Image: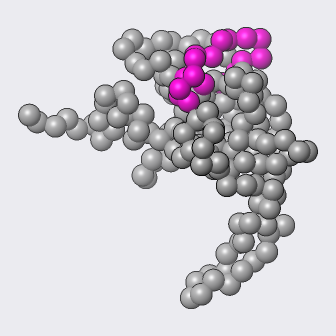
Amino acid sequence: MGQLVQAKGSAVVAKVDEAPSQYLTFSLSGEMFGVGILNVKEIIEYGNLTEIPMMPNFIRGVINLRGAVVPVIDLSARFGGKTTEVGRRTCIVIVEVPDEDTRHDIGIIVDAVSEVLEIPGSEIEPPPSFGAKIRADFIFGMGKIAGKFVILLDINKVLSVEEIAQLTGKDSGGESEAA
């Protein structure tokens, strides 16, 4: 496990570089991605999606999850690619995203969920500054597993409630500006 380190003038904290973390891995447009397992609430079968008119193409609609309305984001389209073709293994991963004092449940469409992997901090490289097909700020790091890379997403940036509200033309604070 990770080492405990006494930081100057503060409490004992875990050294992040050495602490292994668990990631839910999934495929999307032929690439392997991972999100921190602590953000994942559940994985559900794709279906019963209600489309919402006049939304950006990456917002596929909403689902009813035990009485709660949960928006569903198409990650492939969010990354600037084409919308996900729904297949036999397509599913929706429900993740929890913090927004100031509250937490929002958001569904993300993925081609297929793979497995939960434990990746030690020492096996995570910083995100590439160029060459990735998605915005660099969406990438937390590149996890090395058996000689291959898994793109580890910073789910708080990818699903930023504030940024998505701006992209949809809605004010996240619920207030509108007077002209």
Question: Does residue 37 lie above or below 25 as drawn?
Answer: below
Can residue 110 be seen from the camera position used here? Answer: yes
Q: Position of residue 160 (x, y in %)?
A: 47, 41
Q: Is residue 8 left or right of residue 28?
A: left
Report the predominant secondary structure element of the magenta stretch. Answer: loop
Q: Which residues are magenta?
A: 76-92
Judged from this view, the residue extending furthest toward the front is 131
Q: Which color mode does the image show?
A: one colour
Q: Is residue 82 magenta?
A: yes
| Residue at figure coordinates x 67%, y 11% from the top left | 86
Q: Is residue 33 magenta?
A: no
Question: Does residue 12 lie above or below 170 as drawn?
Answer: below
Question: Does residue 117 lie above or below 110 as drawn?
Answer: below
Q: Is residue 86 left or right of residue 2?
A: left
Q: Position of residue 146 (x, y in %)?
A: 91, 45
| Residue at figure coordinates x 59%, y 12% from the top left | 48
| Residue at figure coordinates x 31%, y 30% from the top left | 170
Q: Position of residue 167 (x, y in %)?
A: 38, 30
Question: Does residue 8 lie above or below 121 as drawn?
Answer: below
| Residue at figure coordinates x 11%, y 36% from the top left | 178
